[in-house]
Amino acid sequence: MPSPTPLSRGPLDDPAPRAGLGWALALRAGDVTPWPAWRDSAAADAPAGAPGLPFLPGAQQLELLRRLNVAADGRPLPAGLADRVLRAGSTDRGRGDLPLAGGGAASPFGPPPVDPTDLPAEDLLKVAAGMIAEDLAARAARREPRDRRARWRAGPAYAGDPWAIEYARHDPRWARPPRREGPAYVLAGDLGTLAAHAWAGRALDGAGLDLHGWLRDRITADRLPPALDVVAHARAAAERYGVARTVIVTDPSLLPARDRPAPPPRVGVAAVELTRRVGRPLGLMVAGPERRRLLAHHLVPLLAARPGAAADPLTVPERWLPPLAAQADLMTRALTRAGYPVLGSLEQLVPTVAPTGSSREPEPAAALGLALDLLVDPKDGAW
């Protein structure tokens, strides 16, 4: 974790660092004044010391705390949150705290001082994600035991949609391996949604690319990632269960009630992006399988319960639909020739026009908004 900016960046009788410390103290008490306004109006009257704050925090931490105060809208922050923010590190590799512009003498080493109001959401999100990861890691030791008296049965075999399968395979009704006799359900749907779901599944492992980067790197006019190859999923299932017992599912509501798992939590691109960001520092705190469990079955449901968590549909921007539509046409022909049973229609593989609000590439600001909401209002006991 990067070390905090020491007070030696400027003498305590210099009004510049004193103004920065005064702003930090005010923010800790709930102030929402931006740094330029505080610096111009309060520098001369800033305190010469800062009890309990022996260093000048970085610009990212200070601005994040100010944004949290704004999000709290007059309510007090959860106990200890302000101090956690001021002492937090950034998850940005090789980049420590950014010094505050006008907060003291500039160092000849390291990054130049910055005005916190000019920081992009990306920089604030790195600090917030690390804090959420710490909260999740603290929960890792408090894993809820299963009820040993419950009667669990063998569930069905699933293949296909990686996001849906993550939750289907952890359905609390099923704790035994899939039934040997099948059937095997290949969970499909329109390829635009499947593409976003494939990225979301990778986000649970702390993948390095956002949705735009993942699409750009994985999808071309003649190539799809294996997670989207419905034909390959069906072929692999048929080798074990037979063609007649391999069912393509494009409409989950048509599944038999005994084989119908609960749907995944309803979240949008911003919620998954925040999950991906949190997964990166969390991977340094817990083992890989535990990270996936905490993200998929604790953080994502927490985000799904937030108002507006699914405001940006979990699908791809419209610019990616043409190559996906061409691939869907090829898949429809191959699946029809193979003769697999279908619940729904193979025409549903063709992606439709992206819903309103999903035509633009996702922005870090939306993920930051969810992070602020989660930190300000963690829903007592949720962590």
Image (cartoon, rainbow, N blue to C red):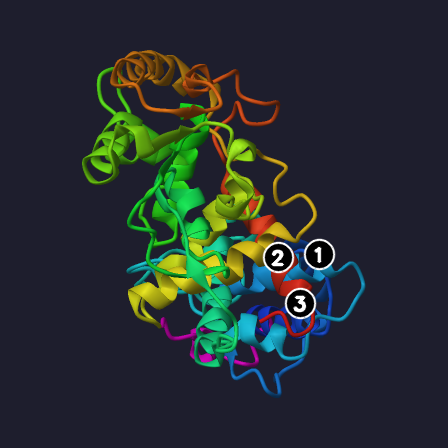
The correct choice, above or below, for 170 with respect to 235 in the image is below
The correct choice, above or below, for 72 with respect to 325 in the image is below
The residues bearing labels 2 and 1 have C-alpha atoms spaced at a distance of: 7 Å
Q: Nearer the viewer, residue 3 or 214?
A: 214
> What amino acid is at disc 2?
Leu
Is disc 3 surrounded by few (<14), some (14 to 19) or many (20+) residues within 10 Å? many
- Residue at the image position 69 percent from the left and 67 percent from the top: 379
Do labels 2 and 1 touch, CB within 8 Å? yes
Marker count (numbered): 3
> What amino acid is at disc 1?
Ala
Do labels 2 and 3 touch, CB within 8 Å? no
Q: Position of residue 33 (x, y in %)?
A: 72, 58
Q: Which residues are magenta?
A: 1-15
Residue named by callout 2 = 372
Is disc 2 surrounded by few (<14), some (14 to 19) or many (20+) residues within 10 Å? many
Sequence-earlier tag: 2 or 1: 1
Q: Nearer the viewer, residue 280 or 313?
A: 313
Residue named by callout 1 = 71
Residue 39 visible in the displayed image: no
- Circle 3 SS class: helix
Q: Nearer the viewer, residue 369 or 199?
A: 199
Q: Position of residue 103 (x, y in %)?
A: 53, 65
